[in-house]
Image (cartoon, rainbow, N blue to C red):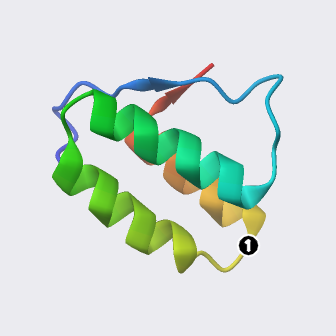
Amino acid sequence: MNVHMTKPTVKLLGEDGNAFNVIARTRRALLEAGMSEQASQFTAEAFGSKSYDALLQLVVAYCDVV
């Protein structure tokens, strides 16, 4: 991912924290920001995450979390 790109914001605090919901909300935030390539890349990487912690680290790499 290009580190110079502005990251979209994804709201996770106070939301259902299961992994599938985290992935869906992050993917949606990327798509709504017009970042379809990053959304596809994120989704592929997310489903390959070895742990929930690794998934959350990936989310933070792609989005600003609130």
Kindly tell me whether residue 1 is visible in this rendering.
no
Judged from the image, the secondary structure of the residue bearing numbered disc 1 is loop
The residue positioned 36% from the left and 25% from the top of the image is: 8
User: Three-letter amino acid code at disc 1?
Assistant: Ser
- How dense is the environment of label 1, judged by Cα within 10 Å: few (below 14), some, or many (20 and up)? few
Is 53 left, or right, of 8 in this rendering?
A: right
Q: Position of residue 39 (x, y in %)?
A: 32, 52
The residue that appears at 55% across and 74% down in the rendered structure is 47
The image shows residue 36 at horizontal and vertical percentages of 21, 48
Q: Quadrant of the C terminus?
A: top right
Res. 38 in view: yes
> Which residue occupies 81% across, 44% down?
17
Q: Is 22 situated above or below 55?
A: above
Q: Is residue 66 left or right of residue 36?
A: right
Name the spot of residue 18 as percent of width and height, x first. 80, 53
Whether 41 is drawn above or below 13: the answer is below
- In the displayed structure, would residue 47 be above or below residue 58? below
The quadrant where residue 32 appears: top left
32 vs 28, left or right, is: left
- Judge left or right: residue 34 versus residue 55: left
Residue drawn where x is 30% and y is 39% of the image: 31
Image position of 13 with respect to 17: above or below:
above
For mark 1, what is the residue?
Answer: 51
Q: Position of residue 57 (x, y in %)?
A: 59, 52
State the image quarter where residue 12 is shown: top right
